[in-house]
Amino acid sequence: MAAILMSSPGSRDRFVTVLARGANAGSVRRLVRDCSGAVAVEFLIVLGPMLLLLLGIFDIGLAMLTEARINFAVEAAAKCGAIGATCASLPQTAAYGASIAGLPGLDASGFLVTTATCGINVTATYAYTGVVLPAITRAPVPVTLSGDLGWPGALEYRLTRFRRLKQYLSQVIARCERLAGEAERIQEAEANVGRGGRSR
C-alpha cells in the first residue's frame, strides 16, 4: 500500500508490475482449487437436455391430445352421418367432423367420408408439426395422425364387447351362487355338529 502512495510514478509502476506477476501464479492455483461456480456450470450443462426432455414430454402429450380429438371427431361425424338429420350429405358430415375436432389446419378437406353397405365410414388425416422438433431443426417435421371409424360398425363392436362382458359377469354370478350354496351347507353342517354336541 505504501508503494501506491509514493509520488514517483516509475516506482509505482514497478510495484504494480511485480504485484501482478506474483498474483498470476497464485491466482491460477487458487482458480484451479476454487469450486464456488461448479454448481452453476453443472446446472448449465444439465439445463439443455432437461429442457429438451420436458418439452418433449409436453410435445408427446399434445400429440396424444390431438389424436384423441381426431378420433372423437371421426366417431361423432360417422354417427351424425349415419343417424343424424344434421349431416344429410357427405360434405356436411365432413364439415361437422372438422367443427367437432376444432384443430387449426384441419378442415372438411381433411375428412374422407364414404358410404358403406350398412352405415358410413369416416377417415380423418392431420399433419401434426409439433413444438420441439421444429425448434431444433428449424423446419416443420409433420407427423400424420389419423382416425378411422365406420358406423354402425363401431356400434356392433361395442355390442360384441358388451355381450362378452355380460357372459363373463354371468359366469362370475354363477360362481358366487355356487360358493354361497357351499357356505350354506358348511353352516348347516356346523349347526348339526353343534346340536349333536349339546345332546350329549
Image (tube, rainbow, N blue to C red):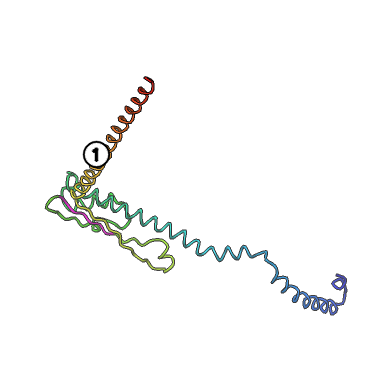
Q: Point out residue 132 in the picture as x, y percentages from the top left corner.
A: 42, 63
Say left or right for 42 vs 149: right
User: Could you say which is closer to the camera, residue 97 or residue 10?
Assistant: 97
Q: Is 122 colored magenta in this rendering? A: yes
Q: Which residues are magenta?
A: 119-125
Q: Is residue 196 left or right of residue 170?
A: right
In depth, the one of 168 and 50 nearer the eye is: 168
Majority SS type along the magenta span: strand
**Residue 182, placed above or below residue 105:** above
**Observer-nearest residue: 159 or 79?**
159
Mark 1 falls on what kind of element?
Answer: helix
Between residues 141 and 198, which one lies in front from this camera angle?
198
Q: Is residue 119 above or below residue 7?
A: above
Residue at left 36%, top 62%? 129
Displayed quadrant of residue 128:
bottom left
The spot of residue 139 in percent (x, y) is: 39, 68
Three-letter amino acid code at disc 1? Ser
Measured as percent of width and height from the top left, residue 83 is found at 17, 44
Q: Residue at x 35, y 53 (%)?
A: 65
| Side (left or right) of 30 relative to 148 | right
**Looking at the image, is 81 positioned above or below residue 3?**
above
Q: Which residue is mark 1?
A: 170
Q: Residue at x 31, y 29 (%)?
A: 184
Q: Residue furthest left?
A: 117
- Image quarter in which the N terminus is found: bottom right
Q: Quadrant of residue 197?
A: top left
